[in-house]
Image (cartoon, rainbow, N blue to C red):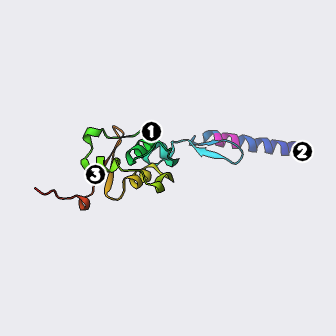
Amino acid sequence: MQKRFAAAAAGLLLCVAFSANADNSMTQFGRYLTMMNKPTQAQTDLLSQTMQVRFPETVRTIGDAMDYLLKFSGYSLIEDNKRSVYLKNTLSKPLPTVDRDFGPMSLKDGLITLIGPAFSLEHDPLNRTINFHLKSGFKKERKQ
């Protein structure tokens, strides 16, 4: 009996010693749940965060919808005076009814969906700003 107890105690001490020496990259939250001790993908790449939105009636334009999506993301659209004429025109268009219920999708995919296929997304992670550039195939030549 004492030998079994001693063996069990030795095994328990070995398990405690092993877990104390293991790297602290995981935290156990219950019997079957462990989590990594590191930020999530959405915390390190803010545009990858998943969102699902039903826009309120006050959101009427594509620009309003962009501002609404970006409100709590840490990003904002570039200042109005730095926006191209094409971007200003698109942002002023009415929000399509089909886009009132939006997601689930990444924030980046949501922004690209709202702006449409004519633009490419550019983000500045330092200043946390979003800009869109008109793709070359969509530029209209101006008559002089």
Residue 65 coordinates in the image, percent (x, y): 43, 46
Label annotation for residue 46? none
Q: Main secondary structure of the magenta part?
A: helix
Residue pointed to by mark 2: 1
Assess whether mark 3 and mark 1 are in contact (beta carbons under 8 angstroms): no
- Give the CA separation, mark 2 to mark 1: 66 Å
Relative to 109, residue 16 above or below: above
Residue pointed to by mark 3: 133
Q: Which residues are magenta?
A: 15-19
Residue nearer the viewer, 128 or 94? 94
First in sequence, mark 1 or 3: give its number. 1
Label annotation for residue 71? 1
Eye-nearest disc, 2 or 1: 1
Q: Using the rendered image of the protein, determine whether residue 45 is visible from the camera's viewpoint.
A: no
| Kind of residue at disc 3 | His
Residue nearer the viewer, 116 or 14? 116
